[in-house]
Each structure stands twice: as structure tokens, then as C-alpha cells.
Amino acid sequence: MSDTASIVQEKNIHKQATLTDKVSPAQQLADRLEADMQAVNAEIMARMHSDVPLIPKLAGYLIASGGKRIRPLLTLAATRLFDSQTNRPYALAAAVEFIHTATLLHDDVVDGSEERRGKAPANLVFGNQASVLVGDFLFSRAFQQMVADGSLDVLRILSDASAIIAEGEVLQLSAQGDLTLTLEQYYKVIGAKTAALFAAACEIGPVIAARSADEIKALRDYGYYLGMAFQIADDVLDYAAEREKLGKAIGDDFREGKLTAPVILALAAASDEEQVFWARTMQDLDQSDEDLTKALEILHKHDALNRGLDIAKDFAHKAQAAIRQIDGDAELIAILEDMALYTVYREA
Amino acid sequence: MSDTASIVQEKNIHKQATLTDKVSPAQQLADRLEADMQAVNAEIMARMHSDVPLIPKLAGYLIASGGKRIRPLLTLAATRLFDSQTNRPYALAAAVEFIHTATLLHDDVVDGSEERRGKAPANLVFGNQASVLVGDFLFSRAFQQMVADGSLDVLRILSDASAIIAEGEVLQLSAQGDLTLTLEQYYKVIGAKTAALFAAACEIGPVIAARSADEIKALRDYGYYLGMAFQIADDVLDYAAEREKLGKAIGDDFREGKLTAPVILALAAASDEEQVFWARTMQDLDQSDEDLTKALEILHKHDALNRGLDIAKDFAHKAQAAIRQIDGDAELIAILEDMALYTVYREA
């Protein structure tokens, strides 16, 4: 273990000791909305059914693997801020999760020559073709759910978000290995591929509850900035020894030549030798087994992970400012406010 | 050249001489609806635009390659049967074509170990990942178009069709190499993966024109049966020397172990030796270069191609019966009636 990794690990042990003392805001939200989430989960299980056995099998593989379901939780919370009774968010929260699951399945598709190290397992187990087609099924199901709900506003919000997500994913693909990618361009990519769906998930709530344009915009902004903070923190965690300690893979972005906040920050201050290193490894994808360790050393030298988290924190503060504009369930507002900052400091 | 192929080629020359004498029904339809189709094409070009350059580039690669655009033509025709003025079908016909293009892009995704012989070129040129993501973009665009049109009925029809298409594609994938596949199961696969979108494309017309439930059903039935005839004829053409003569690949389904009408018919009457042959080639995908020729010989021995076309013809007759129920533009009805039968006898 390198010295750096050892230091990070010690810090991590300290942080874990702190975190076990209290329940995370995401868990607080899940606890507060537990009955609602059970209804959403029932909806998800019922609606991913198909007479074609491979569909619930493959969809269930991903969905049952128990992600945090943060997006449907946001749709529920954004509705319950204003309306404690309506059942409408159940089908729509399920639709949001289906769109998310479809993008995960499609995001994992690889080309023949690529390695699949560190990839999510669905396409490893079931293959590219099945993953794509089941993704299409879930995506279509999401729109069927929205049609059954009957709100053209919701349909507009989520069809717009879906188009933007696809654009963001293509933009990210086009930018692979592009060492000239700026932070602004990176924000555009993650704003589209991640924050757009967070924004849409939140915006649906006040739309269902028939609230004002200002309130709809505030929730949309909250979701957008939360999504930005979430993705930047995620991109930092991809280089974080903490995650590795939890049994998760690190270095996926490095291996794919996907430029994210840490590397963009480190590149801006790179020595000539480091420039050559990044060009060989991330532009030309000419990598040996020791290169990830070397990359981590360079990132730590430039304090790029902490600086990445600082940027994430700035977005989290914007999310907090947005949610504070809302006049609704005070407990939910407080949890959503905490959650924005917590997403930056989560461990995995 | 085998004797069989030589005979087929002679027949083909004869058929071509006949066909050059007159304009095909599909071309008659395109001529009759030329101004409308120009508006649809303009809509397609405008709406496949994105600031991410790879999207119009890849989408245009497929869309500009000049398919027959049979599905948007059907949406136009089904509207013009009743309403010669409305502009509403333009955006919706474009949406139908986008959904079709997205399914083509996703259908072409392959897994690492597979050969790509005879595959459509988009994923060869741009890769699996880009093809999937641009497909997602077009799919989302289609829903944005429908939302802008504002009809929940249309949204229901096309989101239902999209879910059914995905189910059909997964069913087909699950049935690969399954020699026990019955004709009924095969009808279920192609009914979902092909006929559902033909049906939806046609159903939209009378919905836009606010016609009766009976008329909506008649158009839906016409599209469904036309789609069945179209796909069965397509599956026969995949083994037809005529198509090879036109410079198109044959034997794709054979190489992928995809059981279609000709092989299902030949299997029902297979000798023990032929059973072993089909099991080795289509179930185990253990194929040598001569096996396609051998497969064609067996198919011709059982007259499986002609018998496949007879089945397609039965579906075409059902399509004709459905369209004859309609009281609308007589010229269009006559063309649609001819087109059902022509689709069975087309060359490629």
C-alpha cells in the first residue's frame, strides 16, 4: 500500500466512526417516506413484469441489487413537501427509476475490443444485446406509466430529460481521451447525463401538487445542483481508496479515458512529465497495471480529490439555497438541505 | 451456382421484366403523398439536430441512407384517408420514423464474440456505444414530438408499441437457436418486433382525424397484418438468391441462429440428417462456409420459401380485408390494398 493510500485509509476509519453515530440524511428521507417507498417499490416490481422471462430477470438483477433509489425518493419528497395524500407520485417515481435503470443498462454497453473490468455486471452476465433491449423495455414502460398518469407536463419534463441525458452520454463518449476538456465542458456533460434526471425527478413533485412556477423552478434547481454535487463526488470517489476498501472498483474512469473533475484539475497544473503521462494513459489508453497508482499519486500531489469535493460542495450549497426558498413540510426541507451536503461526503 | 439458384434466378429475371412495366404501390403512395413526405422529411432533418455533432452525424448515416420510409408514409396515408388538410401527421410521422431508426440502431448491437458479417453498418462505423446512445436520443426525440403534438391517445399508442417492440426483440433473442420454435411463437415474435409499429403508425391516422373506434381498429388491423406480411416476406428474402443478386447480403438469420418461417417450415418436415444439420448450424452455431448453400438446398427441397410467401400472402389478404372496411379517399384505399400484396412479392 502506498503512503498516500495508507493516510487516506486512516482518515476513512476516522470518518466512519463519526458517521456510524448518526443516520445519513438519505436514510432519514427513506425512513420518513418508508410507506410511500413501499408503494413505489411495489409499483416497480409490478410494472417490470413481462411474459418474456428474460425481462424481469435482467431488470430485477439491476433493480433488486438495491441501489439507494435516490431519484424516486426525490420525486416522493418533492411531492410530499406540498401534498401528504396524493398517490400520483408512485407510478411517476417508478417511471423515474425505470429511466435511470435503462440509462445504466445502456451505459454499460461496450464495444468488442474493450475490457470490461470494473463494469457493472448486467452486461457481463446477460450480454450487450439483452441489456440494450431490456433497457428499451424499461424506458418504454416509463412512458406508459406517464401516459397512464395523464399529465402532459410530466411527459414533457421526462421526455426532455431523456433527450438531454442521451445527448450528455454521447457528448461524454465524444470527449473520451480529450485532454483539452475544460471544467465548463465537463459541467455540461454531467449536467446532461446526471443532473437533468435529478432535476426532472424533483420538478415532478410541485407539478403534481399544482404549485407555482417559482416553486417548480426552485425544486428543479435543487435537483439540478444536487445532481451536479452527486456526480462530481462520484467522480472523485472513482479515485478514492475509501471506495476500494468497501469492495468497490476504483479507476474505471481512468481506464476508459473519461476525463472528470480530479484529472481536469490535475491537468491544469501538470508538469511536462505529468502531461506526457496523462496523454499516454488517458488519451492513447496505453496503460500498464502500475499506472492507476501513479495517477493517484499525481492527483494527491495536486490535492485534486479535495479540490474536486470543494467544487461539489459549491454545488451542494446552491442546492441548499434553492430548497430554502420553499414553503412546505419543514422536516422534509431540513432533510433535503442536509442531503445536499452529505452527498459530497458520502463514502461510496 | 446450384441448379436451384439458377432456376430462382431465371424466375427472378422474368419477374423483374414484369415489374418494370409499372410503378410499385409503395412508389405510387410516395408519389401521391410527395408534398406531405417532403414536410415529414424536413421535420426529420430538423428534429434529429443536436449541438452534439456525433448525433446528427450517426442518425443521418442511417436516416439519409434512404430507406423506403414506409412507416411514416403509412401514418400520412392513414391520416389523408380522412383529412386532406391537417399538418399534425408531419411531426408524428417523423416520431414513428425515429422510433423505427432507434430500434434499428439497437438491433445492430452485438456482443464481443459475435461476427458482424452482414450487419448494418452503423455500429461497424461508430461502435456499439454510440449506436445505443444515439438510438436513445432518437427515441426520446420521438416522445418530445408527441408531447408537442399533445395527444395522450397518440402517446399511449406509441409508448405501448415501443414496449411491445422491446418485448418482441428480447423474445427473439431468447429464442435464438431454439429449434422447437413453433410458427405461432414466431408470429408472436414478429407481431411484436415488427407488426406492432406498423399497426401504431396506421392507427395514429384515424386518431388524428378523430374517427370512430371501428375505423381506428380497421386501420390498426391493416397495419398489423401488413407488418406481418412484410416481416415474413423479409425473412424469406433473407434466403433468396434474388436479394443476393441485388448486392444485398443473405443468410444473416441463418448465421445468427434466428429461426424464421422458412426454417420452421423446413424443420417440420426434416429428415433425421436434416435435423442434425439444423441443430449443428442454428442451435450450436457451428457453421462452415458451405453450410448456407446446404441450408438453401434443404429449404428449396421442402419448398419452404414459397410456402413462407404463401403465409405472408394470407396476412396480406387480411390486411386488404381490413382496409376495405374504410370509407375514405378511394385512391389511397386502392393503393394501400395493392401495397399489402406487393410487399409479399418485393425483391429486396
Image (tube, coloured by chain):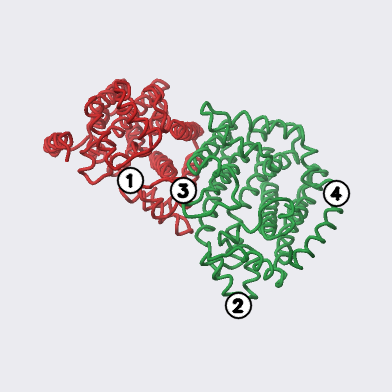
Chain colours: A red, B green
Which kind of residue does numbered mark 1 sit on?
Gly
Label 4: few (<14), some (14–19) or many (≥20) C-alpha neighbours in 10 Å: few
* Residue drawn at point x = 69 percent, y = 51 percent: B248
Q: Measuring from the top left, give residue B335's x and y in whole percent.
A: 80, 47
Label 2: few (<14), some (14–19) or many (≥20) C-alpha neighbours in 10 Å: few
Which kind of residue does numbered mark 4 sit on?
Thr
Q: Which residue is mark 1?
A: A118
Distance CA(mark 2)–CA(mark 3): 36 Å
Which kind of residue does numbered mark 3 sit on?
Gly
Which kind of residue does numbered mark 2 sit on?
Glu
Q: Which residue is mark 2?
A: B273
Q: Which residue is mark 4?
A: B20
Q: Which residue is mark 3?
A: A112
Q: Return the chain for callout 2.
A: B
Q: Measuring from the top left, give residue A226's x and y in whole percent.
A: 32, 28
Could you tell me which quadrant the C terminus of chain A lies in? top left
